[in-house]
Amino acid sequence: MICLDFACHCVKVSGCGVPSYQPDTNRVVNGEEARPYSWPWQISLESFFPTCGGTLIAPNWVLTAAHCITFHTYRVVLAEHDMNKEEGPEHGYICVSILLCRNDIALLKLETSAVINDKVLPACLPQHSETLAHNEPCYVTGWGRLYSGGPKATTLQQALLPVVDHSICSRSDWWGSSAKTTMICAGGESKSACHGDSGGPLNCKGRDGKWYVQGVTSFVDGRGCNTPQRPTMFTRVASFIPWITEVRDDPNVQLLNQNLNLKTYNNHKTNILISINMIELL
């Protein structure tokens, strides 16, 4: 495993963000089972068991949350829907590089490139510094708990989480100073991600009709997943496009893939945001 921390631009993946099986976005209110394979970039991140979600952004690159990563060997499973069944299309890939940024974002390089087909497709990446409008409809997906303290979902779930503008989310009676400009607030009250959804995508449809991973699921309030005026917090992918490009274009990453020992680079330390009023979505 490799731990890098660059001074956090990414090229859009050709053929990204247009699923063969269109997601059903007409009936989602507080969350429901997703149409199988309608979010073909959604991955399950597994060590000894499924721990987090993530997003395929290229055939050999996955985006997830840095707080999902510890000192383990990880496997990425694509084309997963029902965790309790072998449905046929699922395929696992070993991660040979893990690259962390100072914020709650990580890149995983796969040992072999994923086969792109009607059930496996990368999500598109936003433009650097792109912003989302207040109330823009986005969708969180994952196999996390159905509610605070409740059971984990066995099938992939989706929920509509409208974006909450930073000027609102950063108010003292909302998230206050915990809401950074490198984050996206979305949802709130009955609409929320929950524990186990960490690292998964905040999916937002662009004007071009393609789906973009605008956020990486990061944390919720410590009092519960559906706490009023505490929307789910996502790492803003658009803030880290230069870092993503730098990592993917760095030839040293290719060379270091042969060394699976954890490497830490001097003067670059991972700094994951944790405080007593937040819960990581593990």
Image (cartoon, grey):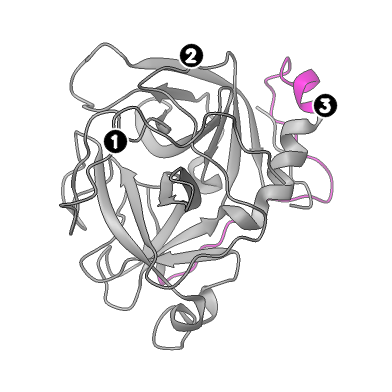
Question: Between tags 2 and 1, which lies in front?
Answer: 1
Q: Could you say whether the residue bearing mark 3 is in a helix, strand or loop?
A: helix
- Residue 272, given in percent of the width and then of the height, sits at 58, 56
C-alpha gap between disc 3 and disc 1: 38 Å
Question: What label sits on residue 72 in the rendered view?
Answer: none
**Which residue type does callout 1 highlight?**
Gln
| Residue 95 is covered by the magenta coloring | no
Q: Residues within 10 Å of mark 3 (few under 14, many from 20)?
A: few
C-alpha gap between disc 2 and disc 1: 20 Å
Query: Foreground: 242 or 282?
Result: 242
Which residue, given by chain and number where applicable, does mark 1 sit on? 22
Which residue, given by chain and number where applicable, does mark 2 sit on? 115
Instruction: Tell me which residue sits at (22%, 14%) in the image.
Output: 86
On-image quarter of the N terminus: top right
**Which residue type does callout 3 highlight?**
Asn
| Residue 266 is covered by the magenta coloring | yes
Instruction: Tell me which residue sits at (32%, 66%) in the image.
Output: 187
**Which secondary structure type mostly characterizes the magenta part of the structure?**
loop
Callout 2 touching callout 1 (CB < 8 Å): no
- Residue 126, given in percent of the width and then of the height, sits at 58, 50
**Vertical placement of 234 versus 68: above or below?**
below
- Residue 54, given in percent of the width and then of the height, sits at 45, 38
Q: Could you say whether the residue bearing mark 2 is in a helix, strand or loop?
A: loop
**Vertical placement of 198 versus 75: above or below?**
below
Question: Which stretch is magenta?
Answer: 253-277
Q: Could you say whether the residue bearing mark 1 is in a helix, strand or loop?
A: loop
Query: Foreground: 125 or 93?
Result: 125
Question: Between tags 2 and 3, which lies in front?
Answer: 2
